[in-house]
Image: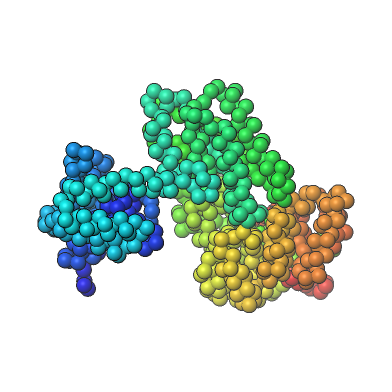
Amino acid sequence: MEDKELIYVAGNPNVYPLEYYDEDAGTYAGVIPELLRQFSQQSNYQLVYYQEGSRDQRAQLAKNRQVDLLSGYTQADEAPSHSQPVTVFNAVWEGEQITYQVYVSDVAPEALKGQLESYFASVDEETLSGTSIHAAVQYPTPHALYWSLAGFGLAAAALTAAVILLMRHYRKMLRKARQSIETDEVTGLGNAEYLTRYYKQFVNDKNRILYKLCYFYVDTDQLRRLSNNEETNEFLRYAATLLQEYTGDSDILARVSDHGFVLAKLSGSAQTDEEWLTSLITRARAYSEKYQKPFEVNLSAGIYPIKASDRDLNEMVFNASQSARAASQTGVDYMVCSDQVLHQLLEERRLQADIERALTNQEFELYLQFYVDCGAHRIVGAEALSRWQHPEKGLLTPGRFIPMMEREGKISKLDYYSLEKVCSFLEELVELGIDTFFISCNFSRDTFAAADFVDNCKRIIGQYQFPRELLVFEITESVSSKNISQLQQNTVALKEYGVKLALDDFGEGFTSFYDLQQYPIDIIKLDKSLIDNMGTERGDAILKAMIRVGHELGVTILAEGVETDDQVETITRLQCDLLQGFRFCYPLPRWEAQKKISQLFLTARTDDKSFSPSAP
Ligand code: C2E
Ligand code: CA
Ligand code: CA
């Protein structure tokens, strides 16, 4: 058994009972996997299914040369790239010969193809029928009865008859399996696979240019943050029902990802498009009011008019989705994908390609925006904010790169990188004799909720000398997070380690008060939207109550985004503790912030002892 060479196999989850993915057993099952297992037992290879699951990933895995063997083909299927077929067995179905095949890829060991050929040639009726019985015993399913009956039949009957039986069952199962594979669980609409299948059926060379791909984007991440998973799903179902109303007989509607629906619409003129789109989006946005939900919902659309030369559905959906995101970011209802939009997308993709280099070359820079106290407006600390000094594009603010890095899964690298910069800055200040200035750091939710977050932070912080309470971690999480318990555990562990915690963007969602109970918070950062809405009697009363609750819990209250003297006056009257905003200063580069801090703290120390501000 030991020292067997590993062979990676990509299976076909959709040809029950010849080969299928058994969810219960968490593995591939059926006649072909069983034969392959027998082959594995008597050969020098150990066969392992690669990326097991109910998605057919064979084409991609073949393209990437990630597997040695691709399974579950007939002669009628499109051959995977970089590979050679080997016949498993032949069967006759409705007078037609069907050849079942596996493909050996060009990264497989050289001898594999020949060995498989001779193994499959040696498989006789008895082995095959035995395999089916064996499969039934090993993987009990609701069809076990059928299997055992089929098993007896197979043992006695000829191979052809057996395969006919199997095929009949297979067709029925395939239809069923297809239905479940092609359905979105949340809304009951078809999913991306469904869209692909119907697109092929509906759209052809003659009618292609009459179709438009409309992508409807829902910021589900934000929605989950502002409400919770169930509320989010409820809105998605509402949106699905609404979209169905606008779906004609020749149109295809599907939910293709967590964020998006696609409606492939046989369309009219631009004017009628404008009408139905505006009506649909307005109705979607009315959801919160209609059902009295305490959060805003949004639906933005990206429209991709299909061109005669377009062939790649995925690319079209991608373009439409990007236009929808662009619409969402710029606050318009919908955006038609034009050359200009595509150009911007291209720019974004180029920027995306620069991220790795930027991290290696340290192109991200630490900027600091000061916090002042409410009384004398003395500088007491700062928030660390990242900027990207791009060699060609100049200085980029986080809006240009953080959402992209989050999508690309690269944000953690930046977060740890920024943390390290902050630690080194704090150490520098302490060396200068400034040991009360505190700095808060932003972390993406995914970074903060990771299992190794605390260890990684301790490793970084441990390399620098400064009092730990000068470091503040900002969290922006709410009840709806996926890894809520891990996140909570992390906050507690960090607190024990000695750093402080701030709750960022407080008041943006309606679950924020819940977070106060969940996390050992030291500072609440009141979201800019609360500050912007100050001035009405009710608004001020709510804010005052919030501040009082915070104070009763022993928490420092900080107002973000303070821009005007009026705001300063009101928020001070409401007994806020700290302020941050353009009214006082913009984010400054590290060197400039350091100069200012040194001037203020070191001069003040000799002149006036009471100036020394303290960390919260
Ligand atoms: P945030 O945490 O809410 O940070 C405050 C943002 O508000 C900053 O934008 C700041 O420049 C801006 N701001 C401050 N005062 C005012 C004001 O008076 N008026 C207005 N209109 N805006 C004000 P910035 O620097 O563009 O950062 C945007 C967001 O990017 C931040 O929002 C933060 O969540 C995120 N971010 C920045 N650096 C990092 C980082 O290293 N890692 C992660 N994960 N996120 C970061
Ligand atoms: Ca922040
Ligand atoms: Ca904030």
Viewer-closest of 300 and 72: 72
Would you say residue 27 is visible in this rendering?
no
Count of marks, rendered view: 0
* Quadrant housing residue 67: bottom left
- Whether residue 556 is visible to the viewer of this picture, yes or no, is yes
Q: Is 195 placed above or below 529 here?
A: above
Q: In this view of the protein, which residue sits in the foreground, 509 or 96?
A: 96
Taking 337 as reference, is 609 above or below it?
A: below
327 vs 360, left or right, is right
Residue at (17, 47) in percent of width and height: 160
Display colour scheme: rainbow
Q: At x 21% / y 50%, what residue is drawn?
A: 162
Viewer-side residue, 485 vs 537: 485
The residue lying at 18 percent from left, 43 percent from top is 92
Residue at image point 16% right, 52% down: 157
Left or right, residue 152 beside residue 433: left
Looking at the rendering, in which quadrant would you find the C terminus?
A: bottom right
| Residue 373 left/right relative to 116 | right
Q: Position of residue 21 (x, y in %)?
A: 35, 56
Question: Where is residue 537 drawn, in percent x and y?
Answer: 88, 51
Identify whether 271 is placed above or below 33: above
Q: Quadrant of ligand 1?
A: bottom right
On screen, residue 399 versus residue 174, left or right, reads: right
